[in-house]
Image (cartoon, rainbow, N blue to C red):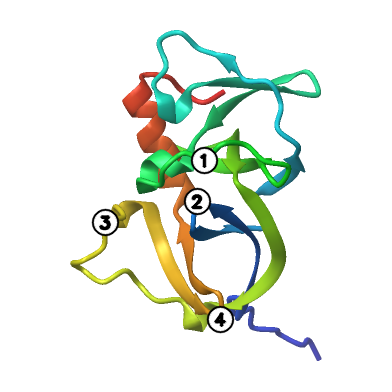
């Protein structure tokens, strides 16, 4: 007799939480490649502030993007808590490596997918295409960004394709 196992979507999602300004964001752990202390950014002369340059990650040139511009979060000075997260996102049908800055990386945690809420249709200053959902936590709202949509928009706005 053969046992057939029905696969269901995972009820839990493992995320890395980070802070940009006062906003907490959740990055799926499956997208995270590594967390780095801030590296020097080589500015690209024609790039805008959202994808302002590239960093060298062990010999690989990686575009450096700022999620804060996608969400209208003011820039803060770097501190000892500042980090760079190297993530893999789908741009088109291609997996693409991109680095993002964080004012702080907080923790790795699990979130129950069923508790994710959609943004209200009105009243949010965040672009709806950039948000997969929001979680209510004891520490406040935790935003789950749609990284693929954000980076596709940033790449087209800056006129450059992420490498």
Classed neighbour count for the residue bearing mark 3: other residues with Cα under 10 Å, few (<14), some (14–19), many (≥20): few
Residue 80 located left or right of residue 161: right
Question: Disc 4 or 2, which lies upstream in sequence?
Answer: 2
Q: Position of residue 70 (x, y in %)?
A: 38, 43
At 57% across and 55% down in the image, what residue appears? Answer: 19
- Given residues 102 and 160, the one toward you in this image is 102
In space, the residues marked 1 and 3 are separated at their CA atoms by 20 Å
Element assignment for label 1? loop
Residue at image mark 2:
21
In space, the residues marked 1 and 4 are separated at their CA atoms by 24 Å
Residue at image mark 4:
138
**CB contact under 8 Å: marks 2 and 1:** yes
In space, the residues marked 2 and 1 are separated at their CA atoms by 7 Å
Q: Which of the two marks, 1 or 4, is nearer to us in this view?
A: 1
Residue at image mark 3:
125
Residue at image mark 1:
76
Q: Position of residue 129 (x, y in %)?
A: 32, 53
Residue 139 located left or right of residue 32: left
Question: Disc 1 or 4, which lies upstream in sequence?
Answer: 1
Residue 54 located left or right of residue 124: right
Question: Disc 4 or 3, which lies upstream in sequence?
Answer: 3
Residue 25 located left or right of residue 49: right
Q: Position of residue 2 (x, y in %)?
A: 78, 86
Q: Which of the two marks, 3 or 2, is nearer to us in this view?
A: 2
In the displayed image of the protein, which residue is found farthest to the bottom? 1
Classed neighbour count for the residue bearing mark 4: other residues with Cα under 10 Å, few (<14), some (14–19), many (≥20): few
At 60% across and 45% down in the image, what residue appears? Answer: 102
* Residue 30 visible (yes or no): no
**Which part of the image, by quadrant, shows the N terminus?**
bottom right
Question: Disc 3 or 2, which lies upstream in sequence?
Answer: 2
Q: Is residue 2 above or below residue 68?
A: below
At 31% across and 55% down in the image, what residue appears? Answer: 126
């Amino acid at each position: 007799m053969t046992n057939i196992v029905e696969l269901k979507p995972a009820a839990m999602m493992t995320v890395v939480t980070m802070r940009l300004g006062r906003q907490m964001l959740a990055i799926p752990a499956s997208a995270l490649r590594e967390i780095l202390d801030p590296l020097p950014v080589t500015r690209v002369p024609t790039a805008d502030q959202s994808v302002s340059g590239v960093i060298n990650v062990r010999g690989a040139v990686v575009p450096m993007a700022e999620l804060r511009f996608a969400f209208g979060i003011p820039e803060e000075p770097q501190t000892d808590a500042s980090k760079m997260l190297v993530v893999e996102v789908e741009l088109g049908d291609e997996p693409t490596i991109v680095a993002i800055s964080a004012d702080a990386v907080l923790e790795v945690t699990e979130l129950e997918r069923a508790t994710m809420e959609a943004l209200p249709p009105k009243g949010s200053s965040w672009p709806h295409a950039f948000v997969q959902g929001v979680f209510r936590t004891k520490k406040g709202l935790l935003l789950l960004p749609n990284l693929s949509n954000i980076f596709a928009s940033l790449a087209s706005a800056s006129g450059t394709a992420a490498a």
